[in-house]
């Protein structure tokens, strides 16, 4: 698609959890035209606005354009999908009212295979993805605490970065979000798994522990590294070369987050659906498809599958 991306896009945020609220508020505070789909706590958001807390600042957005349906929002230039991948069944209804001929739909979801459901609905030419290295938690309607603002990396689905990709990255940078465009989105997804697979998984499997406990325990820290190695080796089978130094960087960053509860652990403990297949199941299946041995990853997948299935009050996928 060669149509120039508008410098002042109309933006929809689909999903007002931690990421949708954080990035949407940043964009709106920077002067962009942002419209939030808020299906729970909308009255509180409209009355009190959005509040963000980071290690260095407090951000308040007093006026919020919040809607109960995407039909009320209407077509936008940029649609940011911030719902969990476990809610993708709802996208077939949510996305069409937001799309016009040149809309870009950017999914922030974790794991592998998350662009495909979006592309099936809006078309691959409209689909892009983002990998978010961020530590953020929604503590109430419109309230987000961000311990690590980090970095966002965006790319096109199945294509190298285009002018519009770089234009969207520029929009986020103007909003104070460090954002880079990349030619190989799938490689970036494998890179994100280097952290997500061990830290989200071990946090749940080891009984609901925070990342500082993993870092302080020699055995768990070693297990995390071995899981990382399996991801890196599998990614290489698909032509994605991730340097070993990238694993060291994940440990350095994690050491700075303190008593951090990974998002999958939060979902598990609060009885919500966990992105089991996207973060653990799909990497196992892809590893098997190319003959890569991932014994620790496969064991972790089955442990998590059992724990999630037998959790009290577990929701069906």
Image (cartoon, rainbow, N blue to C red):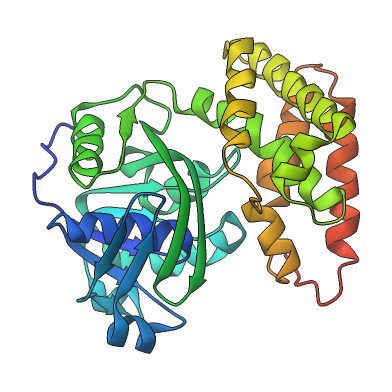
Front residue of 48/309: it is: 48
Front residue of 143/153: it is: 143
Taking 182 as reference, is 277 above or below it? below
Residue 22 percent location from the top left of the image: 37, 58
Q: Is residue 53 visible?
A: yes
Residue drawn at x 42%, y 70% is 143
Taking 82 as reference, is 1 above or below it? above
Residue 211 percent location from the top left of the image: 70, 44
Residue drawn at x 41%, y 33% is 157
Residue 100 percent location from the top left of the image: 21, 56
Q: How many marks?
A: 0
Taking 276 as reference, is 131 above or below it? above
The quarter holding residue 48 reads bottom left
Q: Is residue 261 left or right of residue 207?
A: left
Q: Is residue 143 left or right of residue 247?
A: left
Taking 231 as reference, is 240 above or below it? above
Residue drawn at x 26%, y 33% is 165
Q: Is residue 267 left or right of residue 11?
A: right
Q: Quadrant of the C terminus?
A: bottom right
Residue 163 percent location from the top left of the image: 18, 28
Residue drawn at x 74%, y 40% is 280
């Amino acid at each position: 698609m060669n149509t120039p991306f508008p410098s002042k896009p109309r933006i929809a945020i689909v999903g007002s959890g931690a990421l949708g609220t954080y990035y949407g508020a940043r964009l709106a505070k920077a002067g962009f035209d942002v419209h939030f789909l808020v299906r729970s706590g909308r009255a509180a958001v409209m009355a009190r606005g959005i509040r963000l807390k980071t290690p260095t600042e407090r951000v308040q957005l007093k006026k919020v354009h919040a809607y109960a349906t995407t039909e009320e929002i209407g077509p936008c230039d940029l649609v940011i999908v911030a719902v969990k991948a476990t809610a993708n069944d709802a996208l077939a209804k949510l996305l069409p009212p937001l799309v016009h001929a040149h809309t870009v739909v950017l999914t922030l979801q974790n794991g592998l295979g998350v662009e495909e459901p979006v592309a099936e609905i809006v078309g691959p030419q409209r689909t892009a993805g983002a990998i978010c290295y961020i530590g953020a938690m929604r503590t109430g309607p419109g309230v987000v605490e961000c311990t690590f603002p980090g970095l966002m990396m965006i790319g096109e689905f199945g294509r190298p970065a285009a002018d519009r990709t770089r234009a969207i990255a520029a929009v986020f940078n103007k909003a104070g979000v460090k954002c880079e465009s990349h030619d190989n989105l799938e490689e970036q997804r494998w890179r994100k798994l280097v952290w997500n697979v061990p830290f989200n998984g071990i946090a749940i499997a080891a009984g609901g522990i925070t990342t500082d406990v993993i870092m302080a325990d020699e055995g768990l820290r070693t297990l995390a590294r071995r899981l990382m190695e399996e991801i890196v080796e599998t990614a290489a089978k698909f032509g994605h070369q991730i340097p070993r130094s990238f694993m060291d960087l994940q440990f350095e960053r994690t050491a700075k987050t303190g008593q951090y509860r990974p998002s999958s652990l939060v979902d598990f403990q609060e009885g919500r659906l966990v992105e089991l297949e996207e973060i653990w199941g799909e990497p196992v299946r892809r590893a098997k498809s190319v003959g890569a041995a991932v014994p620790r990853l496969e064991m972790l997948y089955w442990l998590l599958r059992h724990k999630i299935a037998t959790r009290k009050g577990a929701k069906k996928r």
